[in-house]
Amino acid sequence: MEANGATRTDGGGARGRMDSVDPYGFERPEDFDYDSQEELMSRYLVVLTRRCIKWSKLLKGKGEVQKNAKLKRYVRKGVPNQHRALVWMAASGARDRLENNPGYYRSLLAAQHDPKLVETIRTDLNRTFPDNVHFRKTSEPCLQRALYSVLLAYGHHNPTVSYCQGMNFIAGYLLLVTKDEEKSFWLMEALLDRILSDYYSPAMMGLKTDQEVLGELVKVKAPRAWQTMADQNVTWTLVVSRWFICLYIDVLPVETVLRIWDCLFYEGSKVLFRVALTLIHHNEPLIQQARSLSDVCQIFKQITNGPFVDECHAFMQRIFTEPGSLSTATLTKLRSACRSRIIAEES
């Protein structure tokens, strides 16, 4: 169980206490259910071992991968953590951007810094994963310093977006996986400039649009849940904005989030809708029970916890089956209609 940061302290017999910190450095809460976690990991480690063997054969010691049907299938079944940086960089186009722009990241850090940008980023540093040991000032290396550099570089790279809350958590996750500032910067550029275009711009038009698109998709794929939301006069922004802007960080378990990101870097933003639709469709009977705004908010917190999302391998299989078909053409059409509606309402 050491691969998951779990150890036995009793030499057998009764279960020994697992580590109070997970494999990514996050402290487990005081009420953490160690028995359930150990049972879950005993099953998931079998999957991880099998996938590691298959990935080793696929990569054959090479430091690169090519996008094709086989790789897409492998990505959907999970990328072993030791290969994530490589696969994310290749799948997202970040590797090509890094190689075609040598020295660019360092030049951004060497440039004259905007004092307002510096102050805004510094204010958020201590708020970024205070429950993660790698982001503490006492850690060596302390990822807070790397986080500051990545956010500062991106702010100068894209002054239109600059910096907004939520970006610190995304950069933090990238650093936990890559352990590399420059790679994290280029992965951030892939996410914010291309995969999630307009999510973090001042008007956040991309984010607003996709929240409305989700509502339209729920109307078709989980109509009873949609009707409950309409009856209680609850906007989608209220319950799913954090899902989208933080890419499910602090919403779903860490391992589940990383499995979602495997597919996000390979397949794009469509994956975010698949996750949301699966959560809503699977919990439609529960959502129907809501009788007030408060009920809706409570239920939407509830559906992102528990065995359904903890079992990340089974959950990821569900997101590609439970919501049914979701074509790029459908998303493009819905985005166009929703965007026009939002612009008309705001003008």
Image (cartoon, rainbow, N blue to C red):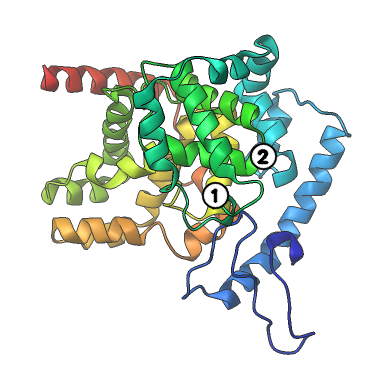
| Type of the residue with mark 1 | Phe
User: In which image quadrant can residue 302 be found?
Assistant: bottom left
Q: Is residue 68 visible?
A: yes
Please say if the residues under marks 2 and 1 sit with CB atoms less than 8 Å apart.
Answer: no
Circle 1 SS class:
helix
Percent position of residue 223, x then y: 26, 45
Q: Is residue 324 visible?
A: no
Tell me what residue is drawn at x 53 percent, y 37 percent. Answer: 147
| Type of the residue with mark 2 | Lys
In which quadrant will I find the N terminus? bottom right
Residue identified by numbered label 2: 179
Tell me what residue is drawn at x 38 percent, y 26 percent. Answer: 117
Q: Nearer the viewer, residue 223 or 124?
A: 124
Picture layout, residue 321 above or below residue 104: below
Picture layout, residue 321 above or below residue 302: above
Circle 2 SS class:
loop
Mark 2 vs mark 1, CA separation in Å? 12 Å
Percent position of residue 45, x then y: 72, 61
Residue identified by numbered label 1: 135
